[in-house]
Image (spheres, helix red, strand yellow):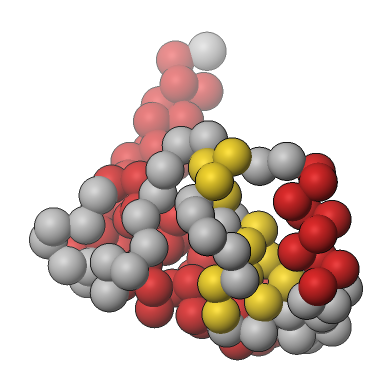
């Protein structure tokens, strides 16, 4: 069993080192929640590039990354913004409701380039 824990620790340390390297490339005054969000969005971007972008999300994901990097967007637990075709399409951030989701999705062709984050 100790070897199992040792392997887990090695995986965690490798993950932490990679995260620290990523954080090191970001502006120093970015919030850690934003840094985590940026990492996730960059992973989504890579996946879209490598596996295809059937829903035309790449430009919107890039816009979100740019907004976080420029501090035009911040992470707020429990709140969302709605994006379509590189633009934020709502006032907010605001609490998520299905009513808002349906409204913005219908207004902005939710099946294409639409993102809730």
Q: Position of residue 34 (x, y in %)?
A: 35, 53
- Position above or below: 106 against 7: below
- Position above or below: 117 against 26: above
Residue farthest top in this picture:
1
Report which quarter residue 25 is drawn in.
bottom left
Residue farthest left in this picture:
28
Q: Residue drawn 49% across and 72% down? A: 64
- Left-right relation of 96 to 88: right
Report which quarter residue 46 is drawn in.
bottom right
Pick the residue in front: 49 or 10: 49
Residue 51 visible in the shown view: no
Q: Residue drawn 65% across and 84% down? A: 85
Report which quarter residue 43 is drawn in.
bottom right
Q: Position of residue 80 (x, y in %)?
A: 56, 49
- Left-right relation of 63 to 112: left
Looking at the rendered structure, the number of numbered marks drawn on it comes to 0
Q: Residue drawn 86% across and 68% down? A: 106
Which quadrant does the C terminus fall into? bottom right
Pick the residue in front: 89 or 49: 89
Q: Where is residue 52 in the image (x, y as percent from the top left)?
A: 78, 85
Q: Position of residue 57 (x, y in %)?
A: 70, 79
């Amino acid at each position: 069993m100790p070897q199992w824990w040792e392997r887990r620790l090695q995986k965690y340390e490798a993950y932490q080192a990679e995260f620290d390297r990523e954080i090191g490339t970001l502006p120093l005054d970015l919030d850690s929640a934003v840094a985590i969000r940026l990492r996730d969005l960059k992973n989504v971007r890579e996946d879209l590039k490598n596996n295809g972008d059937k829903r035309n999300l790449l430009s919107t994901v890039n816009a979100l990354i740019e907004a976080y990097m420029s501090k035009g967007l911040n992470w707020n637990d429990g709140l969302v913004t709605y994006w379509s075709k590189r633009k934020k399409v709502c006032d907010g951030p605001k609490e998520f409701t299905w009513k808002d989701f349906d409204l913005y999705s219908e207004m902005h062709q939710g099946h294409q380039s639409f993102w809730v984050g």
